[in-house]
Image (cartoon, rainbow, N blue to C red):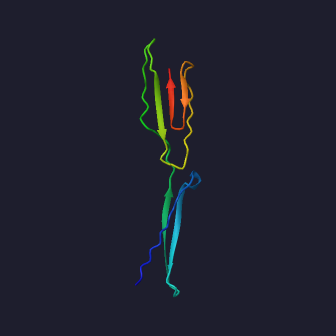
């Protein structure tokens, strides 16, 4: 009896491949005998996550917080993360980078 191993490499490259995929493998012995089996691969797209939970801040009148950094990352390393900021007062400045947003008061 000869045992032959075949390596199947599955590499997802973008979110268009998300879903359940069935793959079939057939072994043939060269003498008209075959055996087949099927397995499932689930490709998921997890959302970006904040590095630390966002916390509400309280600032008294005439008080201040120098800055508040919100950082995030995406476990799907083949995807880039784009941040956007909305609904903040005119006296606050938001600086957006590839992995964080800094609010300056």
Q: At x 49% / y 58%, what residue is drawn?
A: 42
88 relative to 47, above or below = above
Task: Spot the residue most to the top.
Answer: 62
Task: Spot the residue most to the left.
Answer: 1
91 relative to 47, above or below = above
Q: At x 57% / y 52%, what residue is drawn?
A: 14
Residue 54 image point, x, y percent: 44, 31
Q: At x 52% / y 67%, what residue is drawn?
A: 23
105 relative to 51, above or below = above
Q: At x 52% / y 65%, what residue is drawn?
A: 22
Across the whole image, how many numbered discs are drawn on residues? 0
Residue 12 image point, x, y percent: 54, 56
Q: With 16 as the anchor, is 63 left or right in this view?
A: left
Quadrant that contains the N terminus? bottom left
Query: Which one is nearer the viewer's eye here, 1 or 56?
Result: 1
Residue 27 image point, x, y percent: 49, 78
59 relative to 83, above or below = above
Task: Spot the residue most to the bottom.
Answer: 31
């Amino acid at each position: 009896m000869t045992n032959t191993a075949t390596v199947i490499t599955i590499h997802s490259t973008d979110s268009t491949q998300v879903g359940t995929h069935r793959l079939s493998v057939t072994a043939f012995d060269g003498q008209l005998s075959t055996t087949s089996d099927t397995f499932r691969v689930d490709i998921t797209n997890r959302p970006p996550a904040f590095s630390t939970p966002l916390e509400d801040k309280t600032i008294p009148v005439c008080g201040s917080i120098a800055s508040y950094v919100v950082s995030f990352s995406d476990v799907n390393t083949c995807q880039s993360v784009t941040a956007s900021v909305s609904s903040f007062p005119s006296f606050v400045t938001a600086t957006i980078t590839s992995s964080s947003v800094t609010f300056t008061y």
